[in-house]
Amino acid sequence: MGGRKLNKLLIKGGRPLDGVVSVSGAKNAALPIMCASLLTADHLALTNVPRLMDVATMAKLLAQMGVLLERSEDCDESGMTLRAENLVDPTAPYDLVRTMRASILVLGPLIARCGRAKVSLPGGCAIGQRPVDQHLKGLVAMGTNISVEHGYIHAETSRLHGARILMDLVTVTGTENLMMAATLAEGTTILENAAREPEVLDLANCLVAMGAKIEGAGTDLIRINGVKKLNGAKYSVMPDRIETGTYLAAAAASRGRIRLTGASPRTLDATLQKLREAGAKVECTPDSISLEMQGRPTAVGVRTAPYPGFATDMQAQFMALDAVASGTSVITENIFENRFMHALELQRLGADIAIQGNTAVVRGVDKLQGATVMATDLRASASLVIAGLVAEGETIIDRIYHLDRGYESLEKKLSALGARVQRLA
């Protein structure tokens, strides 16, 4: 690239997606599982780890703490081996944490393994307040002394002990952090109102493979019996359900026909139901999903909710689908208070969207028109890609570094499906 940063995506729209692509490993499962390596001195060998900016950032963060990390050069393998035998510095500095909220996931494992941690308060996407008070409240209940000074969480304990923790609100990273901490705590920890997301279950399955004793992961009540030490393990990260849903929504919006391999349909019930409501023909095997959309999609309303409800991470993509659908839809965002920023950019492409509070009313139009737009967060970027694929003429999406945080080989996969996309400086 000769030093030039290719930070824009040019899409020549108007072509239905058609073909077969493979789904990558889930970013939101890979990041906490990488943090689980802090809980043992042994090797943790992972496969199906996506090559993404957030994964590289997490690798950098773990490496500066003393984790030895090797990445497979074979892209097909997507392998990674981590070993935290000698943790030299249980600190997560601001310059790394500010770019990725998932960095907070080192807090629980560091306290459990080292008895202390210094972690910067997180940054990440500009999609609303995502406080870490549930993490801290749970760790205090388990015997951690915590103070927040100069933007850093300082945590210390002589030994974590089991506790009954009722979370005030459902939090995925909070559930994951406390579950990891509890694996090495003395006694039994019970997490009530726990997140039920498949990524939480995937982390629990990896921890169990390492020797943890966990029951109820995937439900709202998780019981963890602490053990003295965890071992190494080999584990394959689950497929990315949001990447899967994004390509399915793109195929539906473009009136295309695609098959996704290496997928996990059972994690996508709410998304698949809405795609069928939109008029798509959807067929599943245990590890693949085929979708065909003949004619214009029908508008579908969605209300975001914690899993197994409709994922907030799929809301923007469905707004793009509804923008070209027949009829009017109502989209209600119940998770994040600032997650309609993509609507203004979709309007630049000709979408008819009215926003009031946490509700968007989308009136489908016959055609979108290509224009220059700007990505504001990861899933907003995906909605603009979908809109660009169906718009007449050329669409240029600026600030696509967001896409590189969550979509592996996006242009390559879209090109394999017949889309005309290229990066620009």
Image (cartoon, rainbow, N blue to C red):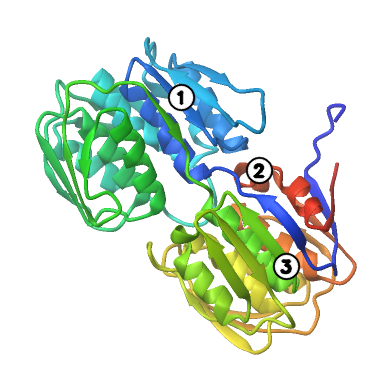
Left or right of residue 328: residue 189: left
Which quarter of the image is occupied by the C terminus?
A: top right
Horizontal and vertical percent for residue 338?
Answer: 51, 63
Left or right of residue 172: residue 212: left
Q: Residue at x 38, y 44 (%)?
A: 202
Identify the element where label 3 is drawn.
strand
Question: For the residue carrying disc 2, how many other residues have a C-alpha within 10 Å: few (<14), some (14-19), or many (20+)?
Answer: many
Horizontal and vertical percent for residue 133?
Answer: 29, 46
Label 3, on which residue?
Answer: 257
User: Is residue 58 visible in the rendered structure shown here?
Assistant: yes
Rounded to the nearest whole Å, what is the CA distance between mark 3 and mark 1? 36 Å
N-terminal-most mark, 3 or 1: 1
N-terminal-most mark, 1 or 2: 1
Horizontal and vertical percent for residue 139?
Answer: 21, 37
Q: Which of 408/208 is in front?
A: 208
Amino acid type at circle 1 is Ala
Above or below: residue 21 compared with residue 60: below
Which quarter of the image is occupied by the N terminus?
A: top right
Label 2, on which residue?
Answer: 408
Label 1, on which residue?
Answer: 45
Identify the element where label 1 is drawn.
strand
Amino acid type at circle 3 is Arg
Left or right of residue 160: residue 237: right
